[in-house]
Every structure is written in structure tokens, then in C-alpha cells.
Image: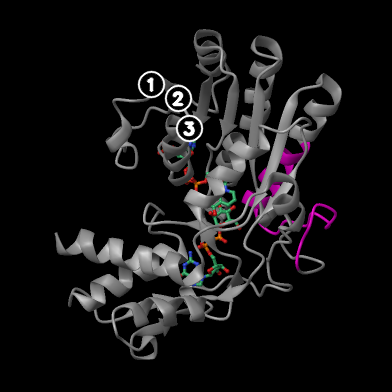
Amino acid sequence: MKVALITGITGQDGSYLAEYLLGKGYRVVGMVRRTSTIDYSRIDHIQDQIEIAHGDLLDQGSLYDIFDTYQPDEVYNLGGQSNVQLSWAQAVLTAESTALGVTRVLDCLRMVTPLARFYQASTSEMFGEADESPQHLGTRLNPRNPYGVAKVYGHLITQNYRQKHGLFAVSGILYNHESPRRDLDFVTRKISHGVAQIKLGLADELRLGNLDAQRDWGFAGDYVRAMWLMLQGDQPRDYVIGSGQAHTVREFCRVAFDVVGLDYQAYVVADPAFFRPAEGHPLVADPGPAQAELGWKPEVGFEALIEMMVRADLAALAS
Ligand code: NAP
Ligand code: GDD
């Protein structure tokens, strides 16, 4: 039985990946950090099938002990501070987990399990104010916030450890992926939750930032499949994963309100408090090479994703 270690198992992607790997017969070990109230809500339903190991990306010794104890065959590094806006307020903490945390994990891999395969959760935010659209592996990295800068470090150190130490280490540059398990801070879940509240009479407006901002959105369940596929190849290499289609926040709102038979224009308020600096070329993936080489294709499209999220929030709020 192969052993998979997932950092960030309590997060959105960690929970979907754990489900996926369990389905493939892996022994799944999830690293959980100590907080005053640990939130297991995303992995409650699989807690009896996984093993929890306590550790923190800021604590080298804890990582080393986990590697030593479980001797993982595959390591998925999904942990870290992942909120773009918060990274301005907590720039150093973001760098500690999202940048240096990667090196700490890679050093364990190098010293304890050098034959293990490693996945690094990189992001389209590394392209930042992008020079071109769609983006591909050759597009210049030009991050525009501390989170993006930290992720560039993680991406490059993964490449460097692969070259210098011969590790099977890959970096997946993933575009926004969402689900009913997305944190409420992110725009998609903020919208689906807001729509459900309005439909049920619990709110009468939804305050958002720039409605013309564009993103390449997909379903998290589809994207964790790509992570696994990247570790099954003959050679380690990096991939760009996205749908290849950009949509505006406004379109997301229109479809989400349509699901409950309402017109978004009557409820959505543009609030300067949620605006970010103007963005140039839209962040949209060129997923061609990943589709050709990995045989990966998303199964849930834009409308289906939104419907799934709105219905899940309606059901949760109505219960
Ligand atoms: P998420 O829901 O925010 O989950 C982040 C996870 O990291 C949580 O389990 C969190 O644990 C853990 N974590 C935070 N700080 C940690 C630390 N110091 N030590 C150990 N664990 C720590 O993020 P996600 O959406 O699942 O994304 C997974 C990864 O992919 C992240 O690295 C993210 O930056 C990256 N990514 C995400 C997207 C996307 O659209 N979702 C796109 C590209 C890349 P707690 O529960 O204790 O907070
Ligand atoms: N959060 C938020 N709240 N975003 C808003 C709002 C609002 O009220 N109104 C408009 N937006 C716009 C943002 O300006 C941005 O252009 C877009 O919606 C998406 O914002 P988020 O959902 O917060 O996600 P993100 O793109 O900043 O970051 C997520 O995706 C990255 C991949 O591109 C995170 O998951 C990152 O960890 C991930 O790397």
C-alpha cells in the first residue's frame, strides 16, 4: 500500500485529494497544525480512514519526525497561508509557510525519503500582472502581492531541488478552483453563500469588489486529479492546470442568482472596500500541454460548478 502525505489536509484541496487517494487504495497521512480549535469539518466524513500527524510548515523538526515515522511514497504540499488579500497584512507569516515551508518539506524529502515523489501547489498568482494571456510555462513570473511572491519562491526552489538533488519534484501551476468547501473569504463562495442567504430571506444585498475582474475558475475535485497524475509520469516536470476560459465576477453572479430565479442586479452592490488594484491581462490558463501529456480534462464546467455551490449553500442554510 502506497503512503501519501498531504500537508494542508484540513483545507479545500487537501480534503478532496484525501478522498481521491483513499479511492485509489492509498494509506493517507494528513498533516494538521495545532490551533486553539482545529477545524476538521472538511475531513469529518473520512476521519476514520486517514491518519492525522501533528506538524507545522514552520517547524522543521515536526516535519522530519513525520517523514521518519511514515516514510511517504508521495508528498503533496498543499499547506500554507493561501489568501491573497491577507498576505498584505501577514506578509512574513505568508512567506514562512508558503515560501520557506516548501524548502523545509523538500529538505525532509532529500534527507529521509529521496525516492518519494513531491507535488508543490503553485498558482496562477505567480504570473500576477501577466504579460500575455493565456499563460503557459514560458510566461514571465510577475507576482503582485506577497502571496504570489512567496509562491514564486516555492516554485523555483522545487525546480532547483529537482535539478540539484535529482528529486522527483513537480510544480503544478493551478488556476482558481472552487467547491462548496471553499472558504467564505473567496469570491465564489462569498457569492454562492450570499445568494442562498438572500433567497432564504437572511440578507438583502451582496457587497462585492470589482465585478469586471476575470478569473479562470474550475472545480477543486477535478484539479486534485491533475495533482495525482503529475506524480505518476516517467519524468518530473511542471504543468499549468486550468479550464482555459476566463469569466468575470459579474458573470459568476448572474449565473448564481439565476439558479434561484433572481436577478443579480437587484442585489449586488459594488463596494470599494473589496476592490483590488487594477489587473491587466486576465489570468487564464493554456491547459493544452497538460491535457495532451496527462490526459487530464475537467469534468465540471462553469455553470455546473456554480449550481453545485449555490445548491450546497441553500441546503446547508436551510437545514
Ligand atoms: P486552503 O483551503 O486555504 O487550505 C490551506 C491549508 O494549509 C489548510 O489545511 C491550513 O491549515 C494549512 N496551513 C496553513 N498554514 C499552515 C502551516 N503553517 N503549517 C501547516 N499547514 C498550514 O487552501 P486550498 O484552496 O485548499 O489550496 C491548497 C494549496 O493550493 C494552497 O497552498 C494554495 O495556496 C494553493 N492554490 C490554491 C488554489 C485555489 O484556487 N484553491 C489555486 C492555486 C494554488 P488550517 O486548517 O490549520 O488553517
Ligand atoms: N475575495 C474577494 N471578495 N474577491 C473579490 C470580491 C470580493 O468581494 N469582489 C471581486 N473580487 C475579485 C478579486 O479582485 C479577484 O480578481 C477575484 O475576485 C478572485 O478573488 P479570490 O476569490 O479572493 O481569489 P484569488 O484569485 O485572489 O486567489 C485564489 O486563487 C489563487 C489562484 O489564482 C486563492 O485560492 C489563491 O490561494 C490561489 O493561488
> Answer yes or no: do the residues labelled 2 and 3 have beta carbons within 8 Å?
yes
Residue 148 lies in the magenta-colored region: yes
Residue 9 visible in rendering: no
Q: Which residue is mark 3?
A: 21
> Answer yes or no: do the residues labelled 2 and 1 have beta carbons within 8 Å?
yes
Q: Which residue is mark 2?
A: 28
Q: Which residue is mark 1?
A: 51
Q: Is residue 246 above or below residue 53?
A: below
Judging from the image, what secondary structure is the residue with disc 3 in?
Answer: helix
Quarter of the rendering containing residue 67: top right
Q: Is residue 30 above or below residue 220?
A: above
Q: Is residue 11 above or below residue 144?
A: above
Of the two numbered discs 2 and 3 on the same chain, state the one appearing first in sequence: 3
Which portion, as a residue range, is magenta?
134-156
Q: CA distance from mark 2 to mark 1?
A: 6 Å
Of the two numbered discs 3 and 1 on the same chain, state the one appearing first in sequence: 3
